[in-house]
Amino acid sequence: MNLSGSARATAAAVVAGATLLATGSIAGAAPAHPVAAAAPDIPVAGVKAHLAQFQSIATANGGNRAHGRAGYKASLDYVKAKLDAAGFTTTVQQFTSSGRTGYNLVADWPGGDTSQVLMAGSHLDSVTAGPGVNDNGSGSAAVLETALAVARAGYHPAKHLRFAWWGAEELGMVGSRYYVGRLSSADRARITGYLNFDMIGSPNPGYFVYDDDPAIEKTFKDYYAGLGIATEPETEGDGRSDHAPFKNAGVPVGGLFSGADYVKTQAQAAKWGGTAGQAFDRCYHSSCDTTANIDDTALDHNSDALAYAVWALSS
Ligand code: DTR
Ligand code: CA
Ligand code: ZN
Ligand code: ZN
């Protein structure tokens, strides 16, 4: 078959790429670094389908998904069923707080070096005032859809992947503190990084990156630089979400945040859009934190950034 010059170049590149993927090097070339698999696009429709389920669960259970209430356990059962069906090894960790039973859900993806564990997590509970779709259905749904994308892709990175959904964050990071507190020092040392996602779909969104571990922060900032979105360091959150127990235990942490009850400035509106002088999330901890309280673009970008970081930090 006669090929034009550019087609020949393309064909050669395809063969080289296939060789590199198959053997880790191009025939005749110096041994190359293994090609890090590229993270898939996370379908925002899939993330929003989980949000719709969380909304329905809250509606059917007194309007919330709070610690110790039926809506929280129903949310956990929903997430667990999806992960079990996808081939994850799931564990439900039970604890008591404020006289009520709480639960963490931990999902291990089989394979990888279990002496190097990359974790991604989010709190699954809402406040009692409402369904908690942005806080924190958004983080929970994005972590779930990324875990399902790992399974769909048959991704088997060098490191071991572990995903987690925490209970009772709204009572003071109770579930994540319980989890970290029960880890042996050896198991704590095996966690190479913990990525936290708490409110990542705010309706008047900001793009904040936790300024904790520099390598994790750079991974997220590189992703957003590729989108041409200027991020800001997340400074109000120190100690205000589930990364705090991990950080206090010496685990490298990072994460993303789209803003809560603070007000967006003119300068922030100029670079991110949205409305200056208005809170990033006017329904923070309110009954109006429903599926209508989500910015799809921010949810999509943050879900894709989540997957990008999981792939980049697990190779
Ligand atoms: N504490 C979280 C919301 C929150 C407020 N500030 C930050 C900063 C970083 C992450 C989360 C938050 C909650 O209400 O669940
Ligand atoms: Ca996407
Ligand atoms: Zn909250
Ligand atoms: Zn939250």
Image (spheres, rainbow, N blue to C red):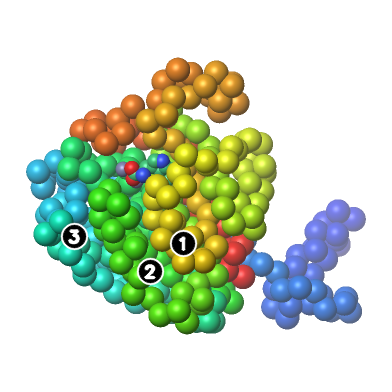
Q: Residue at x 17, y 43 (%)?
A: 128
Q: Residue at x 73, y 80 (%)?
A: 23
Q: Circle 3: is it few (<14), some (14-19), or many (20+) Cα within 10 Å?
A: some
Quarter of the image for the C terminus: give it. bottom right
Secondary structure at badge 1 equals helix
Quarter of the image for the N terminus: give it. bottom right
Q: Do the residues labelled 3 and 2 touch (CB within 8 Å)?
A: no
Q: Circle 1: is it few (<14), some (14-19), or many (20+) Cα within 10 Å?
A: few
Q: Which of marks 3 and 2 is nearer the N terminus?
A: 3
Secondary structure at badge 2 equals helix
Residue that label 1 marks: 248
Q: Can you see residue 54?
A: no
**Where's residue 297, x and y in %?**
47, 36
**Where's residue 269, x and y in %?**
54, 22
**Where's residue 83, x and y in %?**
33, 67
Indicate if the residue with disc 3 has its beta carbon within 8 Å of ligand 1.
Answer: no
Q: Determine which quarter of the picture holds residue 178.
A: bottom left
Residue type highlighted by circle 3: Ser
Residue type highlighted by circle 2: Val
Q: Which residue is drawn at 34% across and 40% down?
A: 134
Residue type highlighted by circle 1: Asn
Q: Are marks 1 and 2 in contact (CB under 8 Å)?
A: yes
Q: Residue furthest front?
A: 248
What's the CA distance linking mark 1 and mark 2? 10 Å
Instruction: Determine whether, in the image, residue 188 is placed left or right of residue 314.
Output: left
Residue that label 3 marks: 97
Q: Can you see residue 23?
A: yes
Ligand 3 is in which quadrant of the figure? Answer: top left
**Where's residue 52, x and y in %?**
26, 44
Given residues 88 and 15, the one toward you in this image is 88
